[in-house]
Amino acid sequence: QAFFQPLLAGLLNKPLPDMRITSDTGSFFRDTVCWAACGMRGWRDAMEDAHVAQMLDATVFPEVALFAVLDGHGGKEVSMLASKLLASEVEACGREQLAEGAKDASGAGSGA
């Protein structure tokens, strides 16, 4: 294998893919929901993907976990930013929906 890697890299005129696999694992709900995320850089110059595995705010989404895989599509900046913001944006949307529901419920009984 060590003989073929430099030969293949020379023929392709670019570096060989990075076949190392990165992984992250965890669990939620007292280990009843286990998760794993794996990634491989491959031919890209740098890893561009990101992932999210996070419990959401229980006051908004009781017993809900958010899982997402975010593909960088040519750059890691957007996928990394999205991985940092996704849960808070989902929770903010949930809070807005709860507020709208409460407003609608209170207005429904007043005949308005």
Image (cartoon, rainbow, N blue to C red):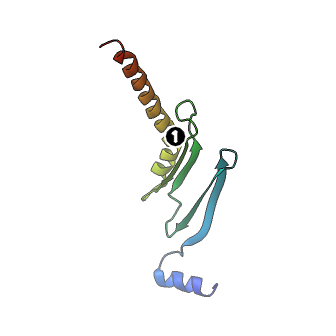
Please state which amino acid type lies under the numbered disc 1. Ala
Location of residue 34 in the rendering, given as x and y in whole percent from the top left corner = 64, 53
Residue appearing at x 70%, y 45% in the figure: 30
66 vs 14, nearest the viewer: 66
110 vs 74, nearest the viewer: 110
Q: Secondary structure at mark 1?
A: helix
Outermost residue, left direction?
A: 112
Residue appearing at x 58%, y 82% in the figure: 5
9 vs 93, nearest the viewer: 93
109 vs 90, nearest the viewer: 109
Location of residue 86 in the rendering, given as x and y in whole percent from the top left corner = 49, 42
Question: Vertical placement of 62 versus 100: above or below?
Answer: below
Residue 36 in which image quadrant: bottom right
Question: Vertical placement of 8 versus 18: above or below?
Answer: below
Residue appearing at x 49%, y 35% in the figure: 91
Q: Quadrant of the C terminus?
A: top left
Location of residue 98 in the rendering, given as x and y in whole percent from the top left corner = 45, 27
Q: How many discs appear?
A: 1
Query: What residue is shown with label 1?
Result: 87
Location of residue 111 in the rendering, given as x and y in whole percent from the top left corner = 30, 13
Q: Residues within 10 Å of mark 1 (few under 14, many from 20)?
A: many
Q: Quadrant of the N terminus?
A: bottom right
Outermost residue, top direction?
A: 110
Residue 105 in which image quadrant: top left
